[in-house]
Image (cartoon, grey):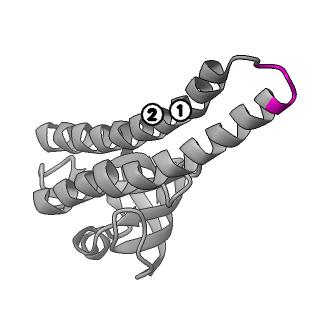
Amino acid sequence: MKKYRGPVLEVTKISSTPGNLGGYMIDSIRIGNRTLRNVNCDDTAAQELRADGTRDVCLYVVRLPYGLIPFPLISNLLGFKYADSGEKHLIPFSFAFNSCLRFAVVAAFAWSIIWGIAGVIVASVLGVWGIITSEMAVAGIGGLPFFAGLAMAWGSSLWLGLSYLRARID
């Protein structure tokens, strides 16, 4: 999880397209001298976050994989805290818990199948070309990406859960 501190100078085009955590997609947030693009957030944070160049804000942003293929990492706004008053707006615990479960179950199922099929194809090609001669090695190499998909999904779930807890504690 990254924390971005500074005054929120601009929040542009909030759309209700469901993103990684559901809710809303913000095209760009300019905080201090940084610009965050394509940030997902829930409906309460989208309504509370306003461009006000006078108040210092700490944004809690976590980058998570998006969709069935875990490569593009999408920024997700877990919440924000005003530095002057200490007022904090975070996604609800139930929302974070459901998102963790979704990563642990749905993404684990999808990513393990996708990576498992890719591993079997690569192992089969290596076996046909004669690079790997043992059938046990071909089977083992084909099965390893399956567990890599599981590890990536469970790691994403754990990363989201720990990032949420860090944002709550801060």
Amino acid type, mark 1: Gly
**Measured from the top left, where is residue 144 in percent x and y?**
53, 29
Most distant residue in the bottom direction: 16
Asked if residue 30 is among those painted magenta in the image, a careful observer would answer no
* Residue 40, image quadrant: bottom left
Viewed as shown, does residue 33 lie left or right of 58? Answer: right
Residue 22 in the image: above or below residue 9: below
Q: Main secondary structure of the magenta part?
A: loop
**Measured from the top left, where is residue 42 in percent x and y?**
29, 69
Secondary structure beneath dot 2 equals helix
**Near-viewer residue (61 or 67):** 67
**Near-viewer residue (104 or 8):** 104
**Measured from the top left, where is residue 169 in percent x and y?**
12, 37
Most distant residue in the right direction: 129
Q: Residue at x 37, y 48 (%)?
A: 61
Residue 132 in the image: above or below residue 164: above
Secondary structure beneath dot 1 equals helix
Most distant residue in the front direction: 135
Q: Which residue is mark 1?
A: 143
- Alpha-carbon neighbours of circle 1 within 10 Å: few (<14), some, or many (≥20)? some
- Alpha-carbon neighbours of circle 2 within 10 Å: few (<14), some, or many (≥20)? some
The span from disc 2 to disc 1 (Cα, nearest Å) is 7 Å
Where are the magenta residues, as a range? Answer: 128-132
Quarter of the image that includes the C terminus = top left
**Measured from the top left, where is residue 152 in percent x and y?**
44, 38
Amino acid type, mark 2: Phe
Q: Which mark is residue 147?
A: 2
Q: Residue at x 45, y 33 (%)?
A: 147
Viewed as shown, does residue 105 lie left or right of 4? Answer: left
Residue 164 in the image: above or below residue 78: above
